Amino acid sequence: MSTLWDKQLPLDAAIHRFTVGDDPLVDQALVPHDCVASAAHARTLHAAGLLSEPDCRALLGALRDARGDAFSGRFAIDATQEDCHTALEQWLTAQVGEAGKRIHLGRSRNDQVLVAQRLMLRASLLRLTQGVQTLALALDGFATAHQDLPLPGYTHLRRAMPSSFGQWAGAYAQGLTEELQAAEGVFQRLDRCPLGAGPGFGVPLPLDRALTAKLLGFSRVQVNPIDCISSRGRDAVAVLDWLCSVAGQLEKLHWDLALYSTQEFGFVRLPIAFTTGSSAMPQKRNPDVVELARARCRQLRALRDQVLAIASGLPSSYHRDLQLTKKPLIEALEIGVLLLEVSATLIARLEPVPERAAEACTPELWATDAAYQRAAAGMPSSGMPFRDAYQQVAAEINAGTFKKPALASDQVALGAPGRLELAATRAELDALGHGWRDHGSRIATLETEIFEMRTTK
Amino acid sequence: MSTLWDKQLPLDAAIHRFTVGDDPLVDQALVPHDCVASAAHARTLHAAGLLSEPDCRALLGALRDARGDAFSGRFAIDATQEDCHTALEQWLTAQVGEAGKRIHLGRSRNDQVLVAQRLMLRASLLRLTQGVQTLALALDGFATAHQDLPLPGYTHLRRAMPSSFGQWAGAYAQGLTEELQAAEGVFQRLDRCPLGAGPGFGVPLPLDRALTAKLLGFSRVQVNPIDCISSRGRDAVAVLDWLCSVAGQLEKLHWDLALYSTQEFGFVRLPIAFTTGSSAMPQKRNPDVVELARARCRQLRALRDQVLAIASGLPSSYHRDLQLTKKPLIEALEIGVLLLEVSATLIARLEPVPERAAEACTPELWATDAAYQRAAAGMPSSGMPFRDAYQQVAAEINAGTFKKPALASDQVALGAPGRLELAATRAELDALGHGWRDHGSRIATLETEIFEMRTTK
Amino acid sequence: MSTLWDKQLPLDAAIHRFTVGDDPLVDQALVPHDCVASAAHARTLHAAGLLSEPDCRALLGALRDARGDAFSGRFAIDATQEDCHTALEQWLTAQVGEAGKRIHLGRSRNDQVLVAQRLMLRASLLRLTQGVQTLALALDGFATAHQDLPLPGYTHLRRAMPSSFGQWAGAYAQGLTEELQAAEGVFQRLDRCPLGAGPGFGVPLPLDRALTAKLLGFSRVQVNPIDCISSRGRDAVAVLDWLCSVAGQLEKLHWDLALYSTQEFGFVRLPIAFTTGSSAMPQKRNPDVVELARARCRQLRALRDQVLAIASGLPSSYHRDLQLTKKPLIEALEIGVLLLEVSATLIARLEPVPERAAEACTPELWATDAAYQRAAAGMPSSGMPFRDAYQQVAAEINAGTFKKPALASDQVALGAPGRLELAATRAELDALGHGWRDHGSRIATLETEIFEMRTTK
Amino acid sequence: MSTLWDKQLPLDAAIHRFTVGDDPLVDQALVPHDCVASAAHARTLHAAGLLSEPDCRALLGALRDARGDAFSGRFAIDATQEDCHTALEQWLTAQVGEAGKRIHLGRSRNDQVLVAQRLMLRASLLRLTQGVQTLALALDGFATAHQDLPLPGYTHLRRAMPSSFGQWAGAYAQGLTEELQAAEGVFQRLDRCPLGAGPGFGVPLPLDRALTAKLLGFSRVQVNPIDCISSRGRDAVAVLDWLCSVAGQLEKLHWDLALYSTQEFGFVRLPIAFTTGSSAMPQKRNPDVVELARARCRQLRALRDQVLAIASGLPSSYHRDLQLTKKPLIEALEIGVLLLEVSATLIARLEPVPERAAEACTPELWATDAAYQRAAAGMPSSGMPFRDAYQQVAAEINAGTFKKPALASDQVALGAPGRLELAATRAELDALGHGWRDHGSRIATLETEIFEMRTTK
């Protein structure tokens, strides 16, 4: 059996192995999306009078089946078939005969992989935003539950000012809410239909690209075909940049947990199911999950860099180099989903250790408060300049005479431990979650209906 | 003279040099923004009754002067002053006495640098979007002027299908339009006021953070202070991610130009002012500008990576590590502006060499067209399957009998050389440009008015 | 079934999946090395009187079998077993009973994986140096065969000076020879035995680490156990740094080939087996192999960066993060071997196209030679300064009156096309190859003999 | 005034600024090396009869002066001169007239910058190895002084086994000794003379490259000129790879210090001169130096990546892109020197806090020892398998009945706290230091003598 482009030329098996690489494995993730995109292409061909209705119906039915097989892991890509696109065309030809040989009219593998990738990115972004929302809600929940438990606030890993478990977890809830908003911009980048670019210079056939876009649920056509092909790395990196921004927050979260769960800090207790033992040391419980989660964040950055490194450094249009972006891209998306799930599960079960945290809230945390109180006293008419109050308190601390102020301030600015506004974050998360779920249902419906051709033309 | 936090402790000069690093130089870029943010802070202190009106007015006047000095390069940061924030506080104290010692009440250097950086990022984004728009318009102009000049389309650096100068330049115009849209999402990320985070756990004073945000032209308060401090790398990387996406397109553009201007391709002529000679070889004209522009794109990625590497790998809250993000960040923003300007200038003067391009449009570029015509003939009722037409044409090419079709297709899909829609891109660019200029004027007005306190309170 | 460290604690399957990751797959590459290292450990335990002779013999036999199974792909690592070390200990216990439960005395999984990785790195380095030597010899062979065929020398991708196919290919042969020398330094880094570090602070048992080192063919003991554990990323990155230096040369080689095989340059013809067709364009032969090879070089750099990113950013000693370095490390080593093989095969079949190359050797390539001849004439007593000769020739070129000198110089410096010294490179390559093969045989012998305990003690 | 290659062509100032970039500043670091290399070139020209003795003597004298000026910061590079090579040639012409116009015969700026860079790399490597040795000796000294002070050994940031301050500091001393050995391989890479490559294809003049190499103290000629030019990134990255390996250890060291000096761990006290205060919080002493040192390590990696990114992704031979590698390279080398110095100073003044460390050595650190003692008892004839002893101890720990063994083991393996072998490391460091200093003196002598031409030829 041979690849589609084979014209009876000798082809060394080693070379084949080198060019095919891990594609038969990697491409599994693209198959369902290729089926959807192929259905849109078939219907556009039919609408242009370039595919008969029976052929079109036959192809749509077969594509729906192939998609089903792909979901259940039964769609096989043979090493000899090079990639999922060749495999799908051959499978269609086997299923529906001549019609299968008509499907590739007016498209090329380059735009085929590009549109399949974009559909995959869109689907992944929907899953990832769901993961972010779930985690953010868990953090907001933790913050709300332990809102007033004191915790030292650290800067430079040194005790700095009074904080709370609520403020700590609320920070991540808020930061992830920002990510959920930012994801909308990424979604818009993806919301362009590249199918119809052909090999990268357009198609000399009267195909209605607006129809293709509509069938696939894209808001607009990505008109210029050179730009379509050149954007293959760009769209992937846009998603990964966003995912890495999320991961940047998760890295801090898990670093905090790794630290706060040490014997020395002792502010939180990791659920036992999230720890493992040692092969040599009978007493150990190790925080493997938070360490691995932390490392996954660095790995996500490295995978993003890998995609970008392979996709860049080249003139415009298609180069085979791009094939190698698929593996790190898909790996990164899968890691992202898993990482968010594990993190949310962990936060849901995390236990604060209030007594250890309270004990660490030593008086000097209120040194700034003391300086502020002295500077504020008698204002605006009179009062000690802050810089003098600061020096005064510093001198007391050096002399060992500093005392925590009798009353800690309750006149606090927005965001301080006493004014966290956790409910506002929760409301925002709910609203954002609704928006993302709406995107999701709309697309799920479209990707089912695409196989059903209701009217004849 | 000493740093603000000096409490008469011995401090080795080498250590000072190590901790200060290049900050006195680097921080010049932050001074104007620190002045604006300090003005907002003074007014907020005043509104809270924590700064008298005369002190506030004195500070505002001095800050306006400092900003003027900074713009004209006359604001000096001494190596002993560590950074611009210390320098500004000392300068204010020298100018307005006691009032200067009152300005730091209720804020910390951590949120001071953070808000100054965010204002700088916002200003830089406005300049960069302007640069992108100018370049995109130049490309759209080039595309329109040379719309129908044929050019071979390449895939794998091999001649593939008929293309045109219009399609080539139009691809970049379209891609950059996408970037201009995507910049809006980045702007929204930046549109949060972090000032008021204090050292990172909020301020025990009744400061009105909504007022601060409004004065600085931010749509919302970034409430949670831990999130504020932790977002210092995140906001910078968001801008750089976007800039690197732009740079990814510029890299392709300059690679194309480097290649198309070789003696071997010869499709474009670089303006002589954009080339340089050789120290040893009398005949050479080298395309240094496009090579350096191409390299700047790789450098931008590396600088983004540097910012991210330094900002990540840490628990939450402030760590001194972050100081080192300033230099690569500012360097990247400046390179971005320059790169866009040079690119736009180059495109405006670029000359196609139509005869060399036409000569390279050899008949086999129409092989796909020929296969399509055979597959389309007689459709939808009958017609040769595409895969058979492909094999037929392939056989003719191998046999040396293939001829370019008598009539090349004019039934083309959207985006093909005959249907570029360049005017639509131009219209979109104009609209986006208006939006960005509106952002710009609004902010410029606010940043002037902030020093004028009209009403007493 | 359960992992070794399981103490009847509940462990959620998802967490298990998250912590185990791809290890059961990835670790296949480590099994043979773990067997060898475990044999050395058993013999060291026996020598210390901590393992009876029968137990030791039983373990050695079983380990030899396990290694055989691993080589033939029959050693199974179950997902429940977490990693190959757990799998091997359980397998040993199943094979030889109580003796299996004795093998882990005095070692930990941390130093077990470290020593297995170091043995793997050592073995990989031997394979990679062989690949480099083969490729370098192919290049030297190509250079020798086409030594005098002219080729334009390019700088800035513009024709610069006369060169030759011999000089072009000889450059890579020489550069790779440098890599082969540099590999010796990497080998020395690896030539330290970490086994005996225990969990990272040494072993409170009288184990003879010098014996372990000798059995495993290491020149010295890596004494300090904290350093051992901390070096886990360092040794991997040392190999990958070297591999990336090699890849930097391969990237240039394949970029040259991608360019020189275009229709526009046309200096070489890629063997048809190294090209593929297009799914849409019947006329295309694409240089997929050189494009993928070029991309693999960027990927190797990214995989190196991934290993380094995961291994760094941490305090000293072991952290679970390190687990994730295994996958990209092993992937990079395998890609390196394949890439070198494919490149050598390609060079062995590469065909120059002398007529196209000669045609491109236009007269201005000799402009520098002309300037030199004018500057050299009459020297040292008199003669035109070079800078004046340069201006004179430049003026002639601008005026269109420049002529290639009647006689091109044959008075050339070492390295110029007339003095390539290819035989010297070949001799050096042969000598280096011998050295590496000697390393290889010595180690192969040791790794067989380690399972045979001849004398009782 | 104009650049050397100016042939009266219009050149827009902006373009000039873009192409020149920061070179006038950056190139200061190269000037002394360019002077040395230019002297070697002049003497080689003279030896070939291409430069008269008086001209040669005049040039050598002027070059010696220029080098002196460069060392004292008085050699000016004007922005109009583009780079130090143009500046030097113009300066020579101004000093010694016609002779200055003769110096560029037989070389090009490409090999000029390459040889200057290699001399700079060689000099930097000598400084860096000195810095590594000094730091390693400080660590070995600290380890020796506090050899027996107990410290908990951590894995996964959890208390694991008994360790000591000596073992902790000794680990770094040993690891840096490895780096000092590995530096020799890097030195050998640099020990090739590229001068004579011309623009990259050799020089059509009878120059004696072996003489040039000898004058410059290189062991061999880097024969093939294409390889010379292509190695410009390779040699820089080789040095930076090594420096990053060193930095990988320093990162761990400073992370350890950041952690061990927290209020929670409290095992070391940072000298007050290495800490700074806070602008807002009167009580704070922050470990800025260790944080910045830690961040510098990440920055070094990023700068290395920048050099590599710019130097790679290109076909063979010279491209202007390479210019941009100079700035990050020089920045990295300077950071490296400073970082090593600061680290050594810090270690020399570091104070352990023995009572806090001893307090943290809780009984369960001896759980492994206990299991080993049970498994070793009665061996080899009988004894409990380790895996059973492990389970037994684990059960006691879970039941709260575990007790630290009466006698901790003194039968320890090499590397355990009782057998650190610090003196051996010190002896090795001394020997390596001697070797590096020998390299240094030899080169210093050569670089002075090169300006003295004793015999006429």
Image (tube, coloured by chain):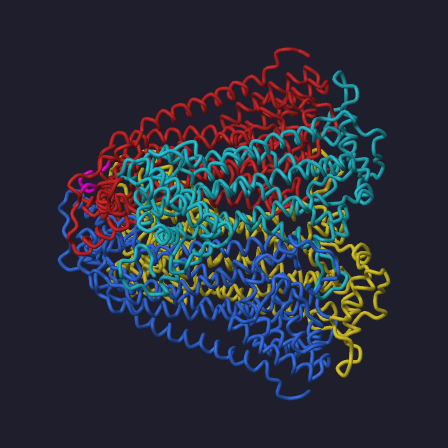
Chain colours: A cyan, B red, C blue, D yellow
- From the top left corner, tell me how far across and down residue C418 is, in percent: 24, 65
Q: Residue furthest top?
A: B455
Relative to B410, residue D311 above or below: below
Most frequent secondary structure within the magenta stretch: helix
Whether residue B357 appears in magenta in the rendering, the answer is yes
Image quarter of residue C233: bottom right
B349 to the left or right of C119: left
Whether residue D203 appears in magenta in the rendering, the answer is no
Relative to A355, residue C231 above or below: below
D364 to the left or right of B115: right
B286 to the left or right of A416: left
- From the top left corner, tell me how far across and down residue D223 is, in percent: 33, 64
B353 to the left or right of C80: left
Quadrant, the C terminus of chain D: bottom left
Image quarter of residue C182: bottom left
Relative to B423, residue C146 above or below: below
Quadrant, the N terminus of chain D: top left
Camera-nearest residue between C405 and B363: B363
Camera-nearest residue between A165 and C7: C7
- From the top left corner, tell me how far across and down residue B456 is, in percent: 66, 11
Visible residue check, residue B142: yes
- From the top left corner, tell me how far across and down residue A442 is, in percent: 50, 34
Q: Residue at x 29, y 41 (%)?
A: B275
Visible residue check, residue D48: no
Q: Residue furthest bottom?
A: C455
